[in-house]
Amino acid sequence: MKARVFVSFKSTVLDPQGQTVCSALHGLGYPGIGDVRQGKFFEISFAPGVTGDQARKDIEAIAHDVLSNPVIEEYRVEMLD
């Protein structure tokens, strides 16, 4: 079993790296790009024998407590079979 965790800045938080990428895209001839927000992606595999319920509980705690800063970031978890 695997989980994917996507972490990004909250919409109210300034994203200077995303702004830099957006400016670079405009300079490269892509004026239709309105905004870019950057983030992080984690793919986590669980050991054999871990139940689905335990995996969901653990990944939510890990995403909140370890992989993201809940003050300025939000996260989304996808469980994979």
Image (cartoon, rainbow, N blue to C red):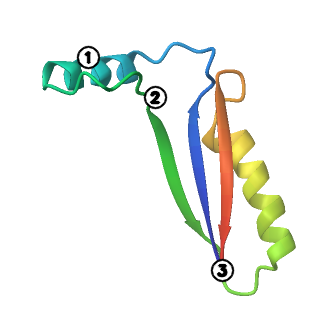
Seen at 48% across and 42% down, the residue is 40
Q: Amino acid at mark 1?
A: Ser
Q: Quadrant of the C terminus?
A: bottom right
Q: Earlier in the sequence, mark 3 or mark 1?
A: 1
Seen from the viewer's position, the closer of residues 80 and 58 is 80
Look at the numbered discs 2 and 1 and tell me whether their residues touch, using CB distance below 8 Å: no
Q: Is residue 7 left or right of residue 26?
A: right
Helix, strand or loop at label 1? It is helix
The residue identified by callout 1 is: 23
SS type, badge 3: loop
Q: CA distance from mark 3 to mark 2?
A: 29 Å
Q: Residue at (57%, 64%) from the top-left corner?
A: 44
Label 2 amino acid?
Answer: Arg
In the rendered image, which residue does mark 3 sit on? 81
Q: Nearer the viewer, mark 3 or mark 2?
A: 2
What residue is at 77 percent from the left and 52 percent from the top? 60
Measuring 63% from the left and 24% from the top, which residue is drawn there?
A: 10
Q: Nearer the viewer, mark 3 or mark 1?
A: 1
Of the image marks 2 and 1, the number of the one nearer the N terminus: 1
The x, y position of residue 19, in whole percent, is: 36, 17
Q: Is residue 80 above or below residue 60?
A: below
Tag 3 and tag 2, C-beta contact below 8 Å: no
Badge 3 amino acid: Asp
- Can you identify the residue that label 2 sits on? 37
Residue furthest to the left: 28
* Quadrant (top left, top right, bottom left, bottom right) of the N terminus: bottom right
Residue 73: image location, x then y, percent: 63, 29
Q: CA distance from mark 2 to mark 1?
A: 12 Å
- Residue 62 left/right relative to 39: right
